[in-house]
């Protein structure tokens, strides 16, 4: 997506930063940022949102831990997730609450470390399927899919009261053509041919700063925060 944007609008330079979903949305509402891609079904005052893509999620564990069929099977096992504020962590906690289960979660800020802990048989984690596919052969881990945790919807957010922002609007149009239209085509193909294999989408809490090079005496800055849901 960013490569397409740069190809179409080479006058825009891109810088990557990070942040939590809540802080990103607060910053948009305070006009510190112009947009964010955030995982999870979130409503935020004064912000518009556009659904773009769904990220498939799986629970992963070492073969040595045995089969996992329900929430009760996690009792007595360590859970490794990103720090509080991660939408995947929140989804896992909500899933456990359905059975009135509350378990401690070890916070880790690296997927490589999370995978290493799970591979060693130390516990379990909820990760995007693309991360599992990347590591499964090296880490000797297996995945489990549960309906409640099956996917995470990602949305693009922007401020309702900022209407004239060409750089941001161009990015929104590219999102629509890259994700929304693709999603509609995939749904149509599923009706005709059956389910398609999902394309891997890695997620990271990523902030993107766009700086449009001056074409006159002024310089326009677009600070675009993208919260992609995985690392």
Image (spheres, rainbow, N blue to C red):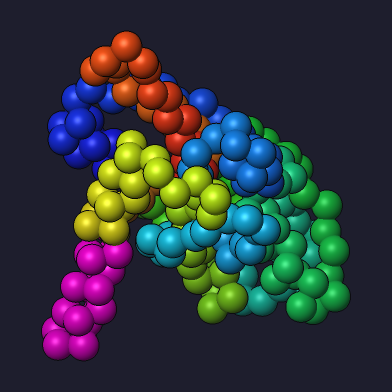
Residue 195 is situated, as x and y percent measured from the top left of the image, at: 25, 79
Q: Is residue 229 left or right of residue 201?
A: right
Residue 64 is situated, as x and y percent measured from the top left of the image, at: 59, 56
Whether 175 is drawn above or below 231: the answer is below
User: In terms of depth relative to the viewer, which is nearer, 102 or 30?
Assistant: 30
Residue 217: tell me if it is visible. yes
Whether 14 is drawn above or below 80: the answer is above
**Quadrant hosting residue 55:** bottom left
**Quadrant hosting residue 63:** bottom right
Whether 38 is drawn above or below 148: the answer is above
Residue 167 is situated, as x and y percent measured from the top left of the image, at: 33, 37
Q: Does the segment drawn in magenta span residue 191?
A: yes
Q: Is residue 109 left or right of residue 199?
A: right
Quarter of the rendering occupied by the N terminus: top left
Q: Residue at x 22, y 57 (%)?
A: 177
Direction top: furthest residue: 217
Residue 56: tell me if it is visible. no
Direction front: furthest residue: 217
Q: Residue at x 59, y 42 (%)?
A: 28
Q: Residue at x 44, y 61 (%)?
A: 50
Q: Residue at x 48, y 64 (%)?
A: 153
Q: Does the segment drawn in magenta span residue 82?
A: no
Direction bottom: furthest residue: 191
User: In terms of depth relative to the viewer, which is nearer, 89 or 45?
Assistant: 45
**Quadrant hosting residue 6:** top left
Residue 135 is situated, as x and y percent measured from the top left of the image, at: 41, 44
Q: In this picture, which residue range is highlighted in magenta?
A: 180-199
User: In terms of depth relative to the viewer, which is nearer, 132 or 8?
Assistant: 8
């Amino acid at each position: 997506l960013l490569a397409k944007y740069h190809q179409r609008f080479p006058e825009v330079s891109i810088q990557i930063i990070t942040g939590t979903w809540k802080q990103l949305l607060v910053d948009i509402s305070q006009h510190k940022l112009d947009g964010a891609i955030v995982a999870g079904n979130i409503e935020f005052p004064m912000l518009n949102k556009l659904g773009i893509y769904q990220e498939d999620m799986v629970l992963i564990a070492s073969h040595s831990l045995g089969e996992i069929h329900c929430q009760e099977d996690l009792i007595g096992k360590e859970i490794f997730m990103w720090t509080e504020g991660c939408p995947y962590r929140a989804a896992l906690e909500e899933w456990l609450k359905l059975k009135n289960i509350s378990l401690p979660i070890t916070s880790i800020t690296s997927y490589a470390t999370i995978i290493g802990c799970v591979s060693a048989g130390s516990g379990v984690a909820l990760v995007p399927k693309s991360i599992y596919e990347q590591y499964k052969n090296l880490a000797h881990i297996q995945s489990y899919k549960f309906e409640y945790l099956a996917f995470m919807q990602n949305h693009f957010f922007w401020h309702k009261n900022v209407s004239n922002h060409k750089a941001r609007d161009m990015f929104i149009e590219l999102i629509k053509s890259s994700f929304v239209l693709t999603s509609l085509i995939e749904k149509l193909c599923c009706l005709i041919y059956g389910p398609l294999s999902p394309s891997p989408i890695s997620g990271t809490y990523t902030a993107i700063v766009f700086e449009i090079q001056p074409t006159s005496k002024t310089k326009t800055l677009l600070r675009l925060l993208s919260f992609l849901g995985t690392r």
